[in-house]
Image (cartoon, rainbow, N blue to C red):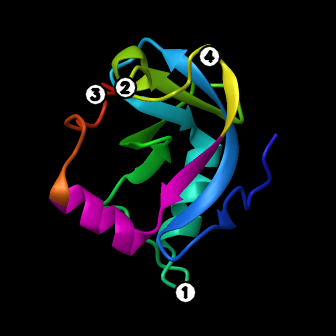
């Protein structure tokens, strides 16, 4: 299981973490809710306890960037990725432990201005 501080500094634009990358039959890449919340707080905390909620976590696996949402049905320490997105990575035999990069706010903003691999629609929980 990953600690509350699951992300380590990697570069000016990214944090790094190690997660089990697994295939997922959902529409969006997801991770366990508590870990997603902790990562979101770490990435978007502006230093005074105020975080941003208007941008998704933007993760990079190999050369593919994609947004990640939270889900209750994902095991802790797992990044569950839809088959179509997974095909764009070099994860040939999931599940597999992989180093993944999480874009810092400035990098995420830049990347989201350039492109999004698929449209992110918030899940309908009603």
Q: Which residue is mark 3?
A: 124
Q: Are marks 1 and 4 in contact (CB under 8 Å)?
A: no
> Reading the chain from its start, which is encountered first: label 1 or label 4?
1
Q: Are marks 2 and 1 in contact (CB under 8 Å)?
A: no
Please rate how many residues cluster around mark 4, counting C-alpha atoms within 10 Å: few if below 14, some from 14 to 19, many from 20. Answer: some
Please rate how many residues cluster around mark 3, counting C-alpha atoms within 10 Å: few if below 14, some from 14 to 19, many from 20. Answer: few
> Reading the chain from its start, which is encountered first: label 2 or label 3?
2
Measured Cα–Cα span from mark 1 to mark 4: 37 Å
> Reading the chain from its start, which is encountered first: label 2 or label 4?
2
Q: Which residue is mark 4?
A: 94
Q: Secondary structure at mark 1?
A: loop
Q: Which mark is residue 47?
A: 1
Identity of the residue drawn at 25% across and 38% down: 117
Q: Secondary structure at mark 2?
A: helix
Measured Cα–Cα span from mark 2 to mark 1: 33 Å
How far across and how far down the image is residue 32, in percent?
A: 60, 35
**Vertical order, 59 against 31 (above or below):** below
Identity of the residue drawn at 41% across and 51% down: 58
Q: Tell which residue pokes out farthest to the bottom in this image.
A: 48
The answer to whether residue 46 is magenta is no
Q: Which mark is residue 85?
A: 2
Q: Are marks 3 and 4 in contact (CB under 8 Å)?
A: no
The quarter of the image holding the N terminus is top right
> Reading the chain from its start, which is encountered first: label 3 or label 4?
4
Main SS, magenta region, reads: helix
Measured Cα–Cα span from mark 3 to mark 4: 28 Å
Measured Cα–Cα span from mark 2 to mark 4: 13 Å
């Amino acid at each position: 299981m990953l600690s509350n501080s699951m992300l380590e500094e990697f570069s000016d634009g990214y944090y790094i973490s190690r997660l089990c990358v697994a295939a997922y039959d959902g529409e969006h890449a997801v991770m366990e809710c508590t870990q997603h919340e902790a990562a979101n707080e770490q990435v978007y905390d502006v230093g005074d306890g105020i975080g941003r909620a208007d941008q998704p976590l933007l993760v990079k696996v190999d050369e593919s960037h994609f947004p990640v949402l939270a889900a209750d049905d994902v095991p802790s320490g797992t990044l569950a990725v839809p088959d179509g997105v997974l095909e764009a990575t070099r994860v040939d035999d999931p599940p597999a432990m992989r180093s993944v990069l999480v874009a810092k706010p400035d990098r995420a903003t830049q990347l989201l201005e350039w492109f999004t691999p698929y449209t992110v629609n918030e899940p309908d929980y009603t």
